[in-house]
Amino acid sequence: MDPAFRYSAVLSAGRGLPFLTSLLRIRLFGFRHAKLKVAGEGALPAVRLARLVLGKSLDIRVDANMAWDTAQAVSIMRSLARYGIHLFEQPLRADDIEGLTRLIKDTSLGVMVDEGVTDRDSLERLIARRACTAVNIRIAKCGGLVAAFNRCLRARAEGLTLQVGCQVGESSLLSAAQVILLAGLQGVRYGEGCYGRYLLREDPVAPLMQFRYGGRPPALPRGPGLGVQVDEKALSRFSLKREIIGTL
């Protein structure tokens, strides 16, 4: 893993004291990158406040989660660029390849695809149409550890900015797989995950895979498999039904 790699803070745009408090926590924790999930009308004031609190040097990107149409996206992206936002995650529907291509041409800003990239064919379509400048690769979305690794290699070969992401609420089991994936890659710009008990009330996996101050990644897990163990007793408290497959 690149020694300079750091995980990003991720938060939803809001207003008032709760949003301000979240921004202050990000600054105090020493993050270098932050992703702000935004919608439409609230995007500009949220980004303005985020930039004010987090400072000019912190790298902020936004995620629209497919909330905009093309004309709306062009307008909002240009407005947010004035506050140093140059990368926009999934601004349009996942299947709007033509719209994504237009955004890049009309704004000259970065466009990251998340929901629109899963298997090899989806990535190749994006590359062929030059419909993105960055991709978000998640193990659980892209077919597992090996498939995600292959998507990352292909994206890097095409010069795309690479983000290795996560699903909300991952335990340390999948976080361990992500850290192993990151250890085999070079040039990963952004990472999301390894929240551990920052997000979960209980993580039934040991050792705990959780980022440290400044977004520093946890140590590479050691041992067989993914290097972590699932506490079956802890897991059983959340189980509704058990099945035995094969013989014991």
Image (spheres, helix red, strand yellow):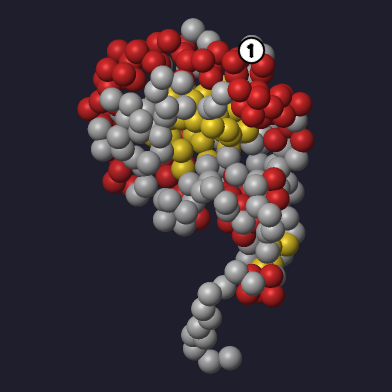
- Kindly give the residue lying farthest to the top in the view shown: 82
Q: What is the x, y in percent for residue 78? A: 40, 11
Instruction: Identify residue type, mark 1.
Output: Leu
103 relative position to 55: left or right: left
**How packed is label 1: few (under 14 Cα within 10 Å), some, or many (20 or more)?**
few
Asked if residue 38 shows in the view, the reply is yes
Q: Secondary structure at mark 1?
A: helix
- Please tell me whether residue 104 is drawn above or below residue 201 in the rendered image: above
Asked if residue 30 shows in the view, the reply is no
Q: Residue at x 65, y 41 (%)?
A: 1
Q: Name the residue carrying label 1.
A: 52
Question: If the image is split into quadrants, where does the C terminus sit?
Answer: bottom right
Q: Nearer the viewer, residue 147 or 213?
A: 213
- Kindly give the residue lying farthest to the front in the view shown: 16
- Please tell me whether residue 57 is drawn above or below residue 194 in the rendered image: above
Find residue 17 and report its image quarter.
top right
Q: Residue at x 77, y 35 (%)?
A: 213
Q: What is the x, y in percent for residue 2? A: 66, 36
Query: Count of labels shown?
Result: 1
- Please tell me whether residue 114 is drawn above or below residue 109 in the rendered image: below
Find residue 65 and report its image quarter.
top left
Q: Residue at x 63, y 12 (%)?
A: 52
142 relative position to 197: left or right: left
Q: What is the x, y in percent for residue 232? A: 66, 74
Q: Residue at x 37, y 41 (%)?
A: 115
